[in-house]
Amino acid sequence: MEQSSAHDDWKATPHGRYLAGRMEGLILGLSAPQAGERLLDIGCGSGEQLSLFRRKGCDVTGVDSSHRLLDLADRKLRNRAELHRGPAEDLPFCDNEFDIVTLIASLEFTDDPGLALAEAVRVCRGRVFIGTLNRFSAIGLQGRLMGLFDPPSDREARFIGLSRINTLLRNQSQGIRPRWGSVLFLPWGWYGFGAGLEEKIPVMKNPCGAFLGLAFPVTFPLRTIQETIRETAALGAEGQRPMPGIVRESKHGP
């Protein structure tokens, strides 16, 4: 709890508000959330990004492998988010269940980033947003990257970088063409006086920022048969009822 409070205190400073605002601007600009959409944040940590999308009117769900961080998220969201414990590589949700799926500073903490990305695509029916930390940026070279986020995992980060993410996307589908950009180009200590310079640097397709964001649409096949038909159905007047096995509700249990 002390760690989360320290991060919240940092975000309340002018320096912290500016850095967080730049990242949030990139996240919202690329993911384009709309009120009423269902959003899943994979590796939700203490709920920082869930709160962001909740303020935009989204119906938010989070999943994380850490009991401790999920407890913090529950307190932060005040029971206004559906939270699940589990790994990013095995999500407890139906296919095509969410309008937006996000992985924000979370692929770095997965055992299998490719499988985690495949799971994100599987449960999405709209668009996926990936936010990742750039260790080759000015802030990264200073060793200050993790100060940008309330830690999303109790495990050590394994940075994967833009080229690795593009490889994962190509492995997922040759047709994926993400929109991408980055923010936070200056060294950590410069933001007390260099905000004007930061805002003059192009964001889109710029790989030099400390926080990289990528978004791409997901198209999914129409599935009409999901179970084997195990019994016959009458073709008379009573046969107006749906045939067993042809349509299954897309609903996951508690």
Image: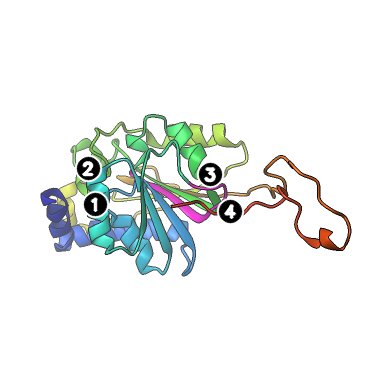
Which residues are drawn in magenta? 93-105
Secondary structure category for the residue under label 3: helix
Q: Is residue 35 visible?
A: yes
Q: Is residue 57 above or below residue 244?
A: below
Whether the magenta-drawn stretch holds residue 62 is answered as: no
Residue 146 has which mark?
A: 2
Label 3 sits on residue:
121
Q: Which one is closest to the eye, mark 2 or mark 1?
A: 1
Secondary structure category for the residue under label 4: loop
Asked if the residues shown at circle 3 and circle 4 are in contact, with their CB atoms under 8 angstroms apart, the answer is no
Choose the circle earlier in sequence order: 3 or 1.
1
Q: Which one is closest to the eye, mark 3 or mark 2?
A: 3
Separation of marks 3 and 1 at Cα, in angstroms: 27 Å
Residue 71 has which mark?
A: 1
Q: Residue at x 46, y 44 (%)?
A: 92
Secondary structure category for the residue under label 2: helix
Choose the circle earlier in sequence order: 3 or 2.
3
Where residue 48 appears, x then y in whole percent? 28, 56
